[in-house]
Amino acid sequence: MNFKFTALFVTAILTADAAKEYSFENDGSTTRGLRVSSDSSSRHNERDLKKNRSKKGSSGIKKDSKKDGMNLSKKSKKASQDTKPVERQLTVSPAYMWQSSAWKQRFLVGESDLAIDVFEETLDKTSEICGADYGYSATVFDHDGNQVFQKSVGTLYNDGYSTIMGNPGTPTEGWDGDTVFPLYSNSKVMAAIVFITSVVETGLGFLDEPLSNTFPEYKDTRVGKITPRMCLSHRTGLKQYYRETVPGEELYYICLRDGSKDYEGCVKEYLLKDEYLTMEPGEILSMEMLANPPNGVYIQYNNTPFDILVLIILKKTSLKNMGEVLRKYVTDPLGMNKTTYDCPSVLSTSEKPMMAFGLCSTSYEMAKIPQMFVRNGKKADGSVLLSENNVREIFQDNHNGGNPLPNAFAGVAASCNKVEHDYDPYDNTGPFVGYGLGTMMPVGVKGEWKIHAASVGGMWVVAPNRFAVYFGHYNAKGYNRELDILNKFERASSFKVRHDGYIVVNETTGALESAPGPFEEITPCVHGMFIDNNEVYDSAVSVTC
């Protein structure tokens, strides 16, 4: 017996035992199929596949596995033949039910037809909005990481623009995909990549290693329990310092920007003290805590703990600064020669890097990051930068489906519940389903997105097993425009999915066999992760200023 199908069958038994139910189908052929989920969290999804299932001539009976076990008796077979198709109500949005990041584990196979023409049309229109020819660059990859589109439009960018220094920048012509600009929060996923490649992949440490292992002086402290995973997923519990120099600075950043102070000293003086903890390291904000935040403030989304990683990385690698680490483990292997922590507009240097927001790069260089992700850690030449397991670590939710982002960001990032005329940045009701390592996790139009947006810079997007995109720009006109392009692109594109092999019983021989399921079209989510509300969608370009 083929091992793959055996594994699926065993999973089916375990899942059915957990779910206490399964679905039986008979299409009139010589085989009968047992459809069960290989993922208990999606058992209802695959039982209630689509309303049009009944139109394909199949019929179904739901059995109680607790009562009848997995025994497909003659009685159940006859009942299935006599039962009329049942019209099932879809209760989970198709955008979420297929869980595209887990297709491999669930033996699902996808098929994509990307609407690149719609992407290009919307990108062209976007740069013309507001009466200015703003520069945007975009690169699109298919589900295998093959580049299928790359283009720069517009010419204007705000050279020197800095939210940190309160500098509106100088309108400058000449934008293209090789223009260097500050990445702001796109730097967060790079911090995860830098840490994992230099420390985890080399065997020097691990994501859940407490700080006290590297710095024994913190053995008997609460901050000594902080781990790199907590730093990268906003779970340290540390107080927040605001990075802006206007109207004033806070002590941590005053220290960092003082040429006479060293980086490690500033981190230890203003971050690594128990008195700066507003909640326990690793603690997740509950709904009750959100309603009544610790110390009266919402502190979880936090840039400064990313800087703790610098101390760990330099101690373990014995390299002299983060510029050297970045080049050795990430940018040289990927051919990203313009990507650097020496980024003046955000007051970041290789010696004193702002790990959460301090990188400078270009649109076309940063496109190599989502390409690497959609290729499960492999570079364009097929060699490995990150193990597939560590890609999963970056994309794994660390908040139990909770939202670590302040209200002003959450609604913007969650596009699934938005129609084009309603991008309200203060609406926190969107299906934001978690935060990984420097990675936001909203539900897109037709499936999961792994993304990170930025205050200024660009936005990277990975739709697992479907596509990947990088947007670059250097102005404050992003977010809604990029989401508008993605919404139109994903709606116009076609994504289909099927089971790679149902377990079926040959009625002649009684042997177990594998039979691929039919492809099913993934339909769009409109107003919510758990609402299948496929109303008419306005496809006109509608981004506003």
Image (spheres, helix red, strand yellow):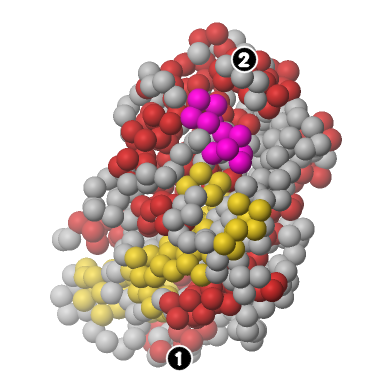
Q: Residue at x 41, y 20 (%)?
A: 320
The three-letter code of the residue at mark 1 reads Lys
- The picture quadrant where one finds residue 478 is bottom right
Residue 543, x across and y down, in percent: 67, 73
Q: Looking at the image, is mark 2 or mark 1 earlier in the sequence?
A: 1
Which mark is nearer the camera, 2 or 1?
2
- Is 412 placed left or right of 218 in the picture? right
Q: In this picture, is 75 found above or below 205?
A: below
Task: Please give the residue where the numbered disc 2 appears in the rendered image.
Answer: 260
Screen quadrant of the C terminus: bottom right
Region of the chain picked out in magenta, as a range: 343-353
Residue to which mark 1 is pinned: 55
Secondary structure of the residue carrying numbered label 2: loop
Could you classify mark 1 by the number of other residues whose Cα lies within 10 Å: few (under 14), some (14-19), or many (20 or more)? few
Quarter of the rendering occupied by the N terminus: bottom left
* Above/below status of 529 relative to 238: below
Please, what secondary structure does the residue beneath circle 1 have? Answer: helix
